[in-house]
């Protein structure tokens, strides 16, 4: 019902920047939260940032001040601007969409296929 396609990953030197995009299609509820998670090599998946359909944002402490999440509802796309990248940011980055009923009950969770971000000198 929901499809998420990430793009924008790649190889960057420490201190560099990347901008990830996630295009959503299918059954997207009016009330939803889109976000980014990442999975470093050999580690578990962790939250990076989220943004609600109303524009409220949340960030992991490790990326505050360096990353910025935004969304374009007309394009059904969420972005992650990543600045001052560090080697520890290396991971597969996944896009997530959570749909909610107007009662606040979660209806579904969807994931993209992931895009690789590598920060290395």
Image (cartoon, helix red, strand yellow):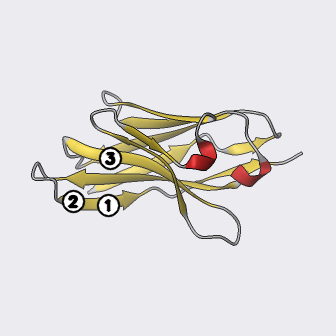
Disc number lying in front (1 or 2): 2
Q: Residue at x 34, y 36 (%)?
A: 56
Local packing at callout 1 (Cα closer than 10 Å; few below 14, some 14-19, many 20+) is some
How much space separates mark 3 and mark 1, taking CA atoms? 10 Å
In the rendered image, the quadrant that contains the C terminus is top right
| Residue under numbered circle 3 | 33
| Residue under numbered circle 1 | 109
Disc number lying in front (3 or 1): 3
Where residue 79 appears, x then y in whole percent? 49, 35
Above or below, comparing residue 79 to residue 103 in the picture: above
| Residue under numbered circle 2 | 106
Please report whichever mark, 3 or 1, sits nearer to the chain's N-terminal start. Answer: 3
Judging from the image, what secondary structure is the residue with disc 3 in? strand
Q: Residue at x 70, y 33 (%)?
A: 17
Where residue 37 appears, x then y in whole percent? 52, 55
Local packing at callout 2 (Cα closer than 10 Å; few below 14, some 14-19, many 20+) is few
Above or below, comparing residue 107 to residue 69 in the picture: below
Local packing at callout 3 (Cα closer than 10 Å; few below 14, some 14-19, many 20+) is many
Horizontal side of 91 relative to 104 (left or right) equals right
Where residue 19 appears, x then y in whole percent? 60, 34
Task: Looking at this view, name the residue that lies furthest to the front.
Answer: 61
Q: Are marks 1 and 2 in contact (CB under 8 Å)?
A: yes
Quarter of the image where one finds residue 1: bottom left
Task: Looking at this view, name the residue that lies furthest to the left.
Answer: 103
Judging from the image, what secondary structure is the residue with disc 2 in? strand
């Amino acid at each position: 019902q929901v499809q998420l396609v990430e793009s924008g990953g790649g190889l960057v030197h420490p201190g560099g920047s990347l901008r990830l995009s996630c295009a959503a299609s299918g059954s997207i509820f009016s009330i939803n939260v889109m976000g980014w998670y990442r999975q470093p090599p050999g580690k578990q998946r962790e939250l990076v940032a989220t943004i609600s359909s109303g524009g409220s944002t949340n960030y992991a402490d490790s990326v505050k001040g360096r990353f910025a999440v935004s969304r374009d509802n007309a394009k059904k796309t969420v972005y992650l601007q990543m600045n001052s990248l560090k080697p520890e940011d290396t991971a597969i980055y996944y896009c997530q969409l959570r749909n909610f009923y107007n009662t606040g009950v979660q209806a579904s969770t969807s994931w993209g296929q992931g895009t690789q971000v590598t920060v290395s000198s």
